[in-house]
Amino acid sequence: MTRVVMRKPVLLVAALLLAGCATPSQQPELNKLHTQVGKLNGELRQLTQQATALTQQNMLNTNSTQGAWLLPAANTAVVLKSQAGDVRLSLSHVSSEANGTRAILNIRAAGEKPLPAFTVRVEWGEMDPTTGKPLQVDSQSQLINVAGSLLPRSEVTIPLRLSNTVPEQSGYIRVHDLVVQAPVQPTSQP
């Protein structure tokens, strides 16, 4: 990570030095170089935001005794210890919609074992920009019921609609209280 971070400022300095030495016939090459430097700066900004979010996500999960925290900007899976055993949580397809954010919550059983029917609580809200901690004020939650399946499955995808939060905001998703549902026993009739 350090090698990538150090290389990009060097390219920026090189571009500025070349700009001072450029003749009019070299203008197209100089414009191309400026475009590349702008693109690299954008990539560096995105990597820095992702690294910051990943650090926050790791800190939240290290101190958590119940549930698991996902920060969309971290773009990294986490493990939730639950009644169904360890499950791996990740977010995908995070995008804006009219009243908030749309995303897919992926839940995968450890070791490819089948997931039983379960309920799980998903909570979301904003992060405090100063402390980097979740703001409980205005947080929202939803109980999700995942029904059993006729065929064993080790992964479930759950569409989420997170109202009043946009992906550009520094937000969080907390997944907790995964409770396995008892299988429905067929009733025998006399």
Image: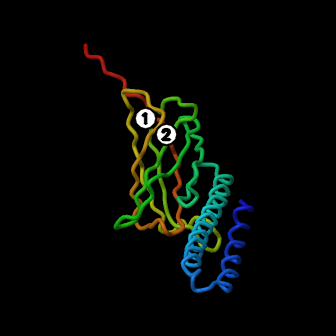
To which quarter of the image does residue 39 belong? bottom right
* On screen, residue 62 above or below 152: below
Residue at image x 39%, y 57%?
A: 161
Residue at the far top: name it: 190
Q: Which of 156 and 176 lies nearest the eye of the viewer?
A: 156
Picture quadrant where residue 133 is located: bottom right
| Mark 1 or mark 2, whichever is nearer to me | 1
Q: Residue at x 67, y 81 (%)?
A: 16
Report the amino acid beneath label 2.
Answer: Val
- SS category of the residue bearing label 2: strand
- Please report the residue visible at 66 percent of the width from the left and 55 percent of the height from the top: 58
x then y, percent, for residue 116: 46, 32
Across and down, in percent, residue 18 comes to: 67, 80
Of the numbered discs in the image, which one, if any, rests on residue 77? none
Quadrant, the N terminus: bottom right
Answer left or right for 25 relative to 138. Answer: right
- Label 1 neighbourhood size at 10 Å, few (<14), some (14-19), many (20+)? some
Apparent side of residue 59 relative to residue 185 in the rendered image (left or right)? right
Q: Say which amino acid is labelled 1.
A: Ala
Which residue sits furthest left? 190
Image position, residue 51 (x, y; %) = 65, 61
Residue 112 placement, left or right of 54: left
Looking at the picture, does residue 73 appear above or below residue 12?
Answer: above
Quarter of the figure with the C terminus: top left
Q: Identify the mark nearer the N-term, 1 or 2.
A: 1
Residue 117, numbered circle: 1
- Identify which residue, 16 or 98, lies in the foreground: 16
Residue 150 position within the rendered picture, expressed as x and y whole percent measured from the top left: 36, 27
Q: Are marks 1 and 2 in contact (CB under 8 Å)?
A: no
In-image side of 179 versus 110 (left or right): left
What residue would you read off at disc 2? 179
Q: Is residue 64 above or below residue 25?
A: above
